[in-house]
Amino acid sequence: MTKSAFSASARPAPRAIARWLLAVAFLVFLMVVVGGITRLTESGLSITQWKPITGAIPPLTHAQWMEAFRRYQQIPEYRAINQGMSLSDFQFIFFWEWLHRLIGRLIGVAFALPLIWFAWKRAIPQGYGLRLVALLALGGLQGAIGWWMVKSGLSVRTDVSHYRLAVHLLTALFIIGGLIWTALDLFALARHSSARPARLRPLAIGVLLLLFVQLMFGAFTAGLDAGYVSSTWPLMNDHLVPQGIQWLGSLWATVSSDPYLVHFIHRWWAWVAAGALILLARKARRAGQRGPSIAINATVGTQIALGIATVISGIALPIAVLHQAVGALVVASAAWAAHAVGARR
């Protein structure tokens, strides 16, 4: 791949590239959903090795299944929690982790091969080559982060580090936002050859930071199983500020690691993030784009309802998975609205 492949070309194809990026964003969204199922079914530690290529093929014989099961039986999660589980139960949790990793491999292929093709055809508009390569590199880094996360639960812990889980989830959501933003820039370029990339305005930065905090505490809530500490709403076990909060040595450790406090923050910071997102939706509407405004209002309202339903259902699997899925759609809507606000005419 030569440098000229990323420079101005005789046959730029911004619309085709934009559609491809949206297709990849959908695959990342699907991976986030399956990742939620993997976490909720406690399946994430079922595959104890990282084989990026050969790991795409699951065990095919009884002997191979028993070998995979034997490796799982050696980690703390099995000895402390799943002692005595059957092979069929192991195959169930293995399936979700395998599917999660398989989609990750599919995303890598679905991004790398078309990128090489577009570069070879000299179809990438000037100024976008490095951005696309950066997105590819970020996807590769995400795979490494996933193994870094899994590895934290294989030796001492009975689950993965909730900090590493947060990095893994937030990186996936950042990739979704980056793919959508780049696709929107390319759609604008397809409409007008002189269109310039949108800018990230100060208001949008502020709103996205508030959303980032909410997403981070959502990841902490999942990683700590903090959703289970209360199944009532709006009060937590008959208290506004829940009882049971323990000081864990420092302010950050307590805020980020105490299940009661993490659940409390995630529950009420949602309203701060929602208010900021609605403000961003209004700005997008004033900028002449109704689509992102409608998307934010629809996804934020749905997400709040699903969050409440997840709590009072006792973390029912279908509702909790929908909660994570719509959370990803909130990110996509926010990226769309931020782009609308920052579009340059």
Image (tube, rainbow, N blue to C red):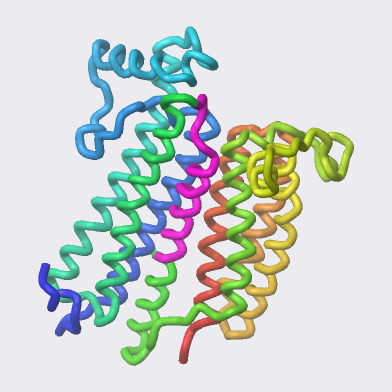
- Closer-to-camera residue (14/275): 275
Going by the image, does 319 lie left or right of 305?
left
Q: Position of residue 255 (x, y in %)?
A: 69, 47
Q: Looking at this view, name the residue that lies furthest to the front.
A: 249
Q: Quadrant location of the N terminus?
A: bottom left
Residue at 42% across / 46% down in the picture? Answer: 31
Would you say residue 12 sits in the magenta stretch? no
Relative to 188, is 239 above or below?
above
- Closer-to-camera residue (134/29): 134
Relative to 34, is 211 above or below?
below
Which region shows up in magenta? 157-178
Going by the image, does 208 lie left or right of 154?
right
Residue at 75% across / 36% down in the picture? Answer: 246
User: Does any portion of residue 237 appear in the rendered image?
Assistant: yes
Would you say residue 158 sits in the magenta stretch? yes
**What secondary structure predominates along the stretch shown in magenta?**
helix
Residue at 62% across / 59% down in the picture? Answer: 299
- Closer-to-camera residue (192/56): 56
Q: Looking at this view, name the residue that lies furthest to the top.
A: 84
